[in-house]
Image (cartoon, grey):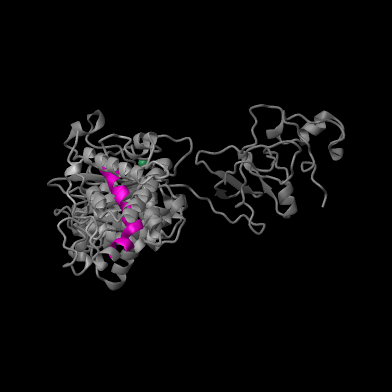
């Protein structure tokens, strides 16, 4: 094979030829050499080695016959080997020469690339791996109809469509998929259970409007009309759709098509006093399928996250349930596990995803929002629940912790007004308010649930608790270390002196002043007994034990007791069994002195 002159061309950074000798086959004249240099790499500062794009944002490829064969989506890489771009002169690309197939770039100046490296040049240009497959151009023309928008209802619809059509990305969806959705889902929506759900999602749409007789025909026509209006996304294109911002809106939408919008008569609700919101046909079309991944919880739950993994697994679970309904012909409406409490349902959903799918969840930093809503005509409503990223990371850590079974107990202790000794199964109490879940969502401490004061024992261990404190409560490592050390010293002191009175006093302290006095007495005792080191320094007291003064003193008390119980629990049980009368019955008058 005759070596291509292009493959040996050596181009300087400024795009000029290095001159004679670098490319013996290219002749000696600079004009000749310049002719051989791809246009994109010449001195023209504006000529970048990047193929021009047409309106659709994809690159058109043509066969030598001139018939378009397809469009391929470029895969952009950070730094690619130097590749030459060819003009529309119809030259044979070195790569095609190698593959014995001739492709021309066509009028769009092409995508023909070569592996030739030009010395010293690094240009950020795309690779088109999909163009050559077994020396044939196998990719077909592909328009992009959907991309995620950030709008929870639209994104939910896109995820539902992707999962139903088994497509990895929204960019992979084509018109056949969208047609299939209409054919598959309209009959599902017409089942009694789904129709009932739709009253809370799309009031007065063709299915829920009682005056519509041919519901199937009307709904199919509505969706097909939307489908016909959907145009591919263009790179250059911008529009006034408030969801995607990529398309021009001709028809405004109301709560009949998009949940939680106002009705058309509420012109004050919408910008510009118009009688609806600007949603393009594609976004409106996607929203019609969002119910497929809603979750029944009295009202409806919509999970929205920036994490592809979270959303994909969630959509997978919901769609699996629908496929089950279809197979068993047991239609129950939106995914329903009989949860009534949205906060508890949120944790149930997240733990289900984290436990059910083996991923590196600890590396995932998702932002998760739960929308608890109804779009019912008489009283639309919306509540938002935000799951902090740190809490998600903590939940993934707990899942693989050796004390996971004790975390389950910690959560159970969070249910209010539940006698855990009497309940038989989880269904008896799982819809009650759970303070552990509530506090995790609101950023309040759950330390007290790690401690069983009555049994003087702990649930979990210091490792689990300190991870929670560090990740969720943002406690500094130095503070944690000091609390742990002081807790250990206190445990040693109680055990060595067999002075359970001090432990009782520590447990019963009801305010900051009392706790401080007890610590002072212990310090005095230790000095009398000639302890090697002080219990803590002034800096540790101010910065680590009580950094906020009387604020949050209770948390410090709990953490010290946690460490004491964790260290002394076995010893304490032994003392109780042996019936040893320790110095426990002493009076507490000496700690009543408070400021
Ligand atoms: Zn849109």
Reply above or below: 552 against 565.
Answer: above
**Residue extending furthest left?**
378
Residue 560 magenta-highlighted:
yes
Q: Is residue 460 visible?
A: no
Reply above or below: 448 against 190.
Answer: above
Read off the magenta span.
554-573
Who's the residue at 84% across and 38% down the image? Answer: 23
The secondary structure making up most of the magenta span is helix
Q: Nearer the viewer, residue 471 or 459?
A: 459
Who's the residue at 17% across and 35% down the image? Answer: 266
**Residue extending furthest bottom?**
328
Reply above or below: 466 against 10.
Answer: below
Q: Residue 515, image x and y in percent? A: 25, 42
Residue 444 magenta-highlighted:
no
Reply above or below: 117 against 196.
Answer: above
In the rendered structure, the answer to whether residue 266 lies left or right of residue 525 reads: left
Q: Nearer the viewer, residue 323 or 299?
A: 299
Q: Residue 29, image x and y in percent? A: 85, 30
**Residue 281, picture quadrant:** top left
Which quadrant contains ligand 1?
A: top left
């Amino acid at each position: 094979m005759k070596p291509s002159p292009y493959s040996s061309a050596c181009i300087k950074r400024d795009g000029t030829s290095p001159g004679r000798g670098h490319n013996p086959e290219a002749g000696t004249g600079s004009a000749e050499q310049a002719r051989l240099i791809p246009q994109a790499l010449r001195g023209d500062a504006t000529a970048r080695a990047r193929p021009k794009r047409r309106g659709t944002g994809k690159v058109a490829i043509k066969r030598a016959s001139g018939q378009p064969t397809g469009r391929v989506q470029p895969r952009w890489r950070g730094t690619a080997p130097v590749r030459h771009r060819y003009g529309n002169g119809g030259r044979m690309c070195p790569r095609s020469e190698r593959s014995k197939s001739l492709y021309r770039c066509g009028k769009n100046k092409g995508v023909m690339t070569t592996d030739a490296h030009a010395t010293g040049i690094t240009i950020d240009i795309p690779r088109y791996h999909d163009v050559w497959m077994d020396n044939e151009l196998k990719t077909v023309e592909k328009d992009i109809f959907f991309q995620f928008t950030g709008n929870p209802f639209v994104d939910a619809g896109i995820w539902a469509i992707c999962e139903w059509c088994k497509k990895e990305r929204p960019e992979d969806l084509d018109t056949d998929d969208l047609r299939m959705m209409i054919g598959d889902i309209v009959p599902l929506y017409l089942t009694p259970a789904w129709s009932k759900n739709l009253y809370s999602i799309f009031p007065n749409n063709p299915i829920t409007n009682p005056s519509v007789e041919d519901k199937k025909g009307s709904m199919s026509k509505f969706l097909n009309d939307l489908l016909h209006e959907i145009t591919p996304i263009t790179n250059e294109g911008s529009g006034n759709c408030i969801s995607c911002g990529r398309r021009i809106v001709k028809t405004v939408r109301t709560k009949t098509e998009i949940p939680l919008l106002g009705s058309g008569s509420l012109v004050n609700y919408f910008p510009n006093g118009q009688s609806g919101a600007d949603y393009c046909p594609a976004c409106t079309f996607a929203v019609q399928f969002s119910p497929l991944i809603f979750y029944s919880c009295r009202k409806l739950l919509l999970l929205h996250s920036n994490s592809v993994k979270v959303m994909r697994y969630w959509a997978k679970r919901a769609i699996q349930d629908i496929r089950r309904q279809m197979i068993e012909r047991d239609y129950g409406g939106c995914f329903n596990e009989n949860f009534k409490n949205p906060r508890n349902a949120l944790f149930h959903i997240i733990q289900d995803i984290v436990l059910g799918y083996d991923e590196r969840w600890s590396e995932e930093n998702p932002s998760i929002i739960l929308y608890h809503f109804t779009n019912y005509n008489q009283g639309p409503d919306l509540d938002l629940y935000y799951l902090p990223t740190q809490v998600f990371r903590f939940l993934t850590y707990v899942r693989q912790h050796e004390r996971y079974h004790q975390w389950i107990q910690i959560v159970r202790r969070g249910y209010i007004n539940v006698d855990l000794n009497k309940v038989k199964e989880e269904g008896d109490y799982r819809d009650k308010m759970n303070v552990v879940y509530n506090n995790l969502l609101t950023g309040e401490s759950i330390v007290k649930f790690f401690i069983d004061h009555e049994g003087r024992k702990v649930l979990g261990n210091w490792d689990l608790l300190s991870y929670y404190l560090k990740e969720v409560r943002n406690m500094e490592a130095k503070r944690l270390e000091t609390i742990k050390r002081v807790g250990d010293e206190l445990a040693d002191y109680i055990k060595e002196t067999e002075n359970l009175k001090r432990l009782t006093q520590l447990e019963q302290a009801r305010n900051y002043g009392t706790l401080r006095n007890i610590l002072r007495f212990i310090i005095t005792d230790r000095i009398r007994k000639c302890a090697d080191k002080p219990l803590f320094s002034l800096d540790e007291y101010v910065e680590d034990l009580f950094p906020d003064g009387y604020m949050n003193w209770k948390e410090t008390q709990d953490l010290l007791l946690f460490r004491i119980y964790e260290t002394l629990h076995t010893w304490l049980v032994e003392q109780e069994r042996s019936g040893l009368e320790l110095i426990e019955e002493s009076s507490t008058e000496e700690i009543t002195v408070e400021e």
